[in-house]
Image (spheres, grey):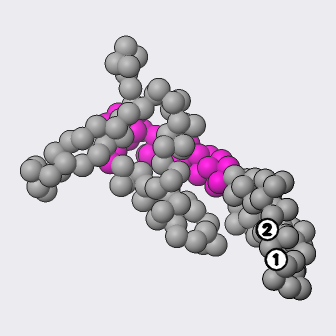
Amino acid sequence: MSTFADRLRQMAARQRRATRYPESVDDQASQAREAEESGYESRRGEDLQEALLRNVCAELESDEAFMNRMRSTGDTWINVRNRIEQLLPDLVVNTAERAHQLVSSAMNELFGKNGWKTESRPQKKNPERSVTWIVLVEPGDE
């Protein structure tokens, strides 16, 4: 049974094997143009993003404490982002930014596009500052 990180490594290895190493600057430009025209580069990025999202959502959904907290009180955006960051494989570069990018998509997958919202609430330690919370939408609150 392979782990998610193993599957990502295998995907990267297949992509490296599929890529011809250019011999000259002209070959590099030609290869870049072909990739752009075929949409290969954007598809590869989307494939990785989708794989990360599926894995993160599966992990969050199986985390009873997280799901119970979201269903009862919600949680701060930063706490959700930090939890997602913990779930990303070690080989992901810039995990904080990637986790931030995944928050909305993960909430949409877990609770539906209209099933959650953000609220600005006073910070506990400093009530003059506000913190963004993610809370689930009650039926009729939309």
Give above or below for 16 relative to 120: below
Q: Residue at x 42, y 59 (%)?
A: 82
Viewport quadrant of the C terminus: top left
Report how far apart the C-alphas of labels 1 and 2 lie in the structure.
6 Å
Q: Residue at x 37, y 54 (%)?
A: 79
Residue 28 x/y as whole percent: 82, 77
Q: Residue 32, which numbered label?
A: 2
Viewport quadrant of the N terminus: bottom right
Residue 41 x/y as whole percent: 75, 60
Q: Quadrant of residue 81?
A: bottom left
| Amino acid, disc 1 | Gln
Which residue is at the front of the view, 21 or 137? 21
Q: Is residue 62 visible?
A: no
Identify the residue at the far bottom of this view. Answer: 23
Q: Secondary structure at mark 1?
A: helix
| Amino acid, disc 2 | Ala
The residue at which mark 1 appears reads as 28
Give above or below for 96 relative to 104: below
Q: Residue at x 38, y 26 (%)?
A: 137
Q: Quadrant of residue 118?
A: top left
Identify the magenta region.
48-76
Sort mark 1 into few (<14), some (14-19) or many (20+) by Cα contacts within 10 Å. some
Q: Residue at x 52, y 70 (%)?
A: 94
Q: Secondary structure at mark 2?
A: helix
User: In this figure, what is the number of numbered marks?
Assistant: 2
The answer to whether residue 81 is left or right of residue 133 is: right
Is residue 74 one of those drawn in magenta?
Answer: yes
The answer to whether residue 98 is left or right of residue 69 is: right
